[in-house]
Every structure is written in structure tokens, then in C-alpha cells.
Amino acid sequence: MRNLAAGLAAFAAVLLVAPVPARAAAAAPCIAKSGSDATETREDSSVDEGEIRWTASTKYKAEYQHANGAWSYSGAKIRIAPDSATTVNDLNYEDFSDAKNAAAGVWSRHPGPAATDLIRFNRARMDTFDPATRRMVAAHELGHALGLCHKSGSGKSAVRSVMWPEVARYPDVPTDVDKANYKKLWG
């Protein structure tokens, strides 16, 4: 009887100190009400046959390499790999400079057979940022190439996300919310 009581006491002690299992983050809604950023669809992405094959003609090598690695986390379904002589280029990283343009980075879709989508970094903005902010911009734009939309960064429905629409020192890697949206879209 004493062994049973001791066993129950030990079990109760484990229950008291055991961490509560974390709840999986929920996917967050898009903040846009219309347009291509109002939904998350596979068709509005750079993904081709389960992968994004990329090339780069940008000075922001460390930033796009960071983004590629950040979205290649354990459990990610979409392969992000350099283009080769035997594959079709899905995405090109490149630069532009426009001081009048407030965007630090822009992803643009170019639909059609063998079309190459673009992630363009605005040197006029990117050169004013610290490395962490530049990495955030690159990860954010690659999130768009993966089909993800903007998430709310303020108000009642605020979520912590690399897909927040404003440049800030916000996460430079996908958060649990980003991964939940990714999983909802890509499985």
C-alpha cells in the first residue's frame, strides 16, 4: 500500500511540474480585402511542381540566402533550390533603385509557361537598413513567392509574422503563424 501511495505521489508531482503542451498556432487571415493579396493560393505563387528554382543577380546575397534557408525549415514541403541547366527557373532575385518607391522589396508574378517571377530589392531602401531588417525583407518577399499574403501587425487581430506588411525589425524567419499558413496552403 505504501508503494502505491508513493507511486501516486510521484505521479502527481510529475503532473504539477510537467509543462503544458503548446497549442499549435492557428493560421492567420489575410488583411487585404481584395486583390491578389486577399487570399493565399497555390496559383498565386512561384512554386512549380513542389519547388522553387531560383537564380540571383542581386547584391543582397546574404539576405536571399537567409530567406531560402529560413523557408526551408524542418517540415517544409516546398524545395527551394538553385536553378540548373536541366531545370526551369521559377524565380530571380534582382535589384532596382527608386528613391520615390517606399517598398524595400517586391515580389511579382509572371504567369505563363516557363515564366520567371521576380523578387526585386530596392537599393534606395535596402541600403538604409541594418542586416536584420534586410533579412526580414528578403524572407517576407520569399513568403509571397510561396503564396502567402500580408498578416496584421497591429490592432485586435495582430499576429507575429514575417508577413507583416511594414518594414520593421520584426521576425526575419517564419513564425509559428507563418508555418501554420504555409501548412494550410502546402500541407
Image (cartoon, rainbow, N blue to C red):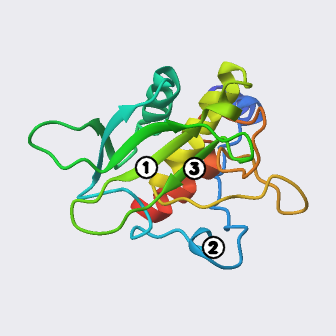
Q: Residue at image x 70%, y 29%?
A: 133
Report the amino acid beneath label 1.
Leu
From the image, which quarter does the C terminus lie in? bottom left
Mark 3, residue position: 106
From the image, which quarter does the N terminus lie in? top right
Cα separation, mark 3 vs mark 2, equals 16 Å
Report the amino acid beneath label 3.
Val
- Report x, y in % for residue 3: 63, 26
Cβ–Cβ under 8 Å for marks 1 and 2: no
Badge 3 marks a residue whose secondary structure is strand
Badge 2 marks a residue whose secondary structure is helix
- Report x, y in % for residue 94: 45, 37
Mark 2, residue position: 38
Q: Residue at image x 43%, y 34%?
A: 68
Query: Dot 1: within a 10 Å radius of its alpha carbon, few (fewer than 14), some, or many (20 or more) residues?
Result: many
Q: Please indicate, yes or no, whether residue 1 appears anywhere in the rendered image.
A: no
Quick check: 91 left or right of 12?
A: left
Mark 1, residue position: 118
Cα separation, mark 3 vs mark 1, equals 8 Å
* Residue furthest right as drawn: 155
